[in-house]
């Protein structure tokens, strides 16, 4: 998978962002400063210091547990991460591929967009899922680039044409070295055809799994029971791990066959 995609944005990172936001909240910082300055001016700094610390921590706790603040922090972090992902890699346009491959890439990106939309509407932070889906689509596009090479090679040298030429040389029977070369070439082209067929089959299956990821997310978002949300979230994580493993398997198959 591409190494330049940022690490998944999980609950731990979201919690750290909430803590940092609470500690650096302007109201809390100003409150702390005012109390400390008053203590210095009145000559009772030592007595005021613990009071200032308690007030500051109480204000930070209020900010941390404020739901509206948490939603704003999550929206900000999501926006920053999305900008990072978009700047991290330039995507090829679907029409840069052969039509059949381009349609699959377009379909995968459409599903990715729908998954991101479902995450935006979810009540829980599922940015780690969005990150894995982005990693998967990036890996899938890398595999599509390999498939494009196979497509172009087969278009330049159609197996049927090589097979027809091999039959012609075989009937003549006076060019054994050419016949051997054509036999090897035909075997290679047939192997490339099978790789390309496997790519299309695997892509179709993975598109179905991406739809399942979206369905799982919508189900989690619609559920009001926290236990059910936790269980379904685990199912979603397991599913996107299988999707990622499928992309790796596709890449490995192309590496082994070329």
Image: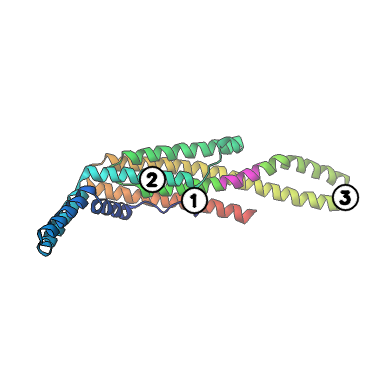
**Start and end of the magenta stretch?**
143-151
Q: Is residue 149 magenta?
A: yes
183 to the left or right of 53: right
Question: Secondary structure of the magenta portion, mostly?
Answer: helix
Q: Which is more toward the observer, 98 or 245?
A: 98
* Residue 167 position within the rendered picture, expressed as x and y whole percent measured from the top left: 81, 43
Q: Residue at x 23, y 42 (%)?
A: 68
Q: Are marks 1 and 3 in contact (CB under 8 Å)?
A: no
Name the mark nearer the viewer: 1 or 3: 1
Task: Provide the residue designation for mark 3.
Answer: 175
Mark 2 secondary-structure assignment: helix
Residue 245 appears left or right of 197? left
Residue situated furthest right in the rendering: 174
Question: Residue under circle 1?
Answer: 246
Q: Is residue 184 left or right of residue 25?
A: right
Q: Residue at x 33, y 54 (%)?
A: 13
**Local SS, label 1:** helix
The image's colour scheme reads rainbow
Residue 245: image x %, image y %?
A: 47, 53
Residue depicted at x 42% and y 40%? 211
- Closer to the chain start, of discs 2 and 1, is 2
Residue lying at the far bottom in this picture: please name it: 46
Asked if marks 2 and 1 touch (Cβ < 8 Å), the reply is: no
Relative to the observer, which residue lies in front, 107 or 2? 2
Q: CA distance from mark 2 to mark 3?
A: 66 Å
- Residue 80, numbered label: 2
């Amino acid at each position: 998978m591409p190494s330049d995609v940022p690490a998944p944005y999980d609950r731990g990172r979201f919690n750290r962002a909430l803590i940092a936001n609470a500690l650096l909240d302007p109201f809390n910082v100003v409150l702390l400063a005012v109390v400390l300055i008053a203590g210095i001016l009145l000559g009772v700094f030592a007595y005021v210091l613990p009071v200032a610390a308690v007030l500051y921590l109480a204000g930070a706790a209020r900010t941390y547990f404020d739901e509206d603040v948490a939603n704003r922090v999550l929206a900000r972090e999501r926006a920053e991460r999305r900008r990072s992902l978009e700047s991290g890699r330039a995507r090829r346009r679907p029409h840069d591929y052969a039509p059949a491959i381009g349609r699959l890439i377009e379909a995968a990106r459409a599903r990715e967009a729908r998954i991101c939309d479902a995450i935006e509407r979810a009540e829980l932070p599922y940015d780690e899922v969005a990150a894995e889906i982005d990693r998967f689509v990036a890996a899938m596009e890398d595999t599509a680039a390999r498939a494009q090479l196979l497509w172009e090679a087969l278009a330049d040298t159609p197996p049927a044409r090589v097979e027809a030429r091999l039959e012609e040389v075989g009937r003549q029977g006076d060019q054994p070295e050419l016949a051997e070369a054509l036999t090897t070439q035909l075997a290679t082209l047939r192997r490339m055809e099978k790789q390309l067929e496997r790519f299309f089959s695997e892509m179709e299956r993975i598109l179905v799994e991406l739809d399942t990821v979206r369905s799982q997310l919508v189900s989690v978002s619609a559920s009001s029971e926290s236990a059910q949300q936790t269980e379904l979230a685990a199912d979603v994580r397991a599913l996107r791990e299988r999707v990622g493993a499928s992309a790796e398997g596709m890449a490995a198959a192309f590496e082994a066959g070329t």
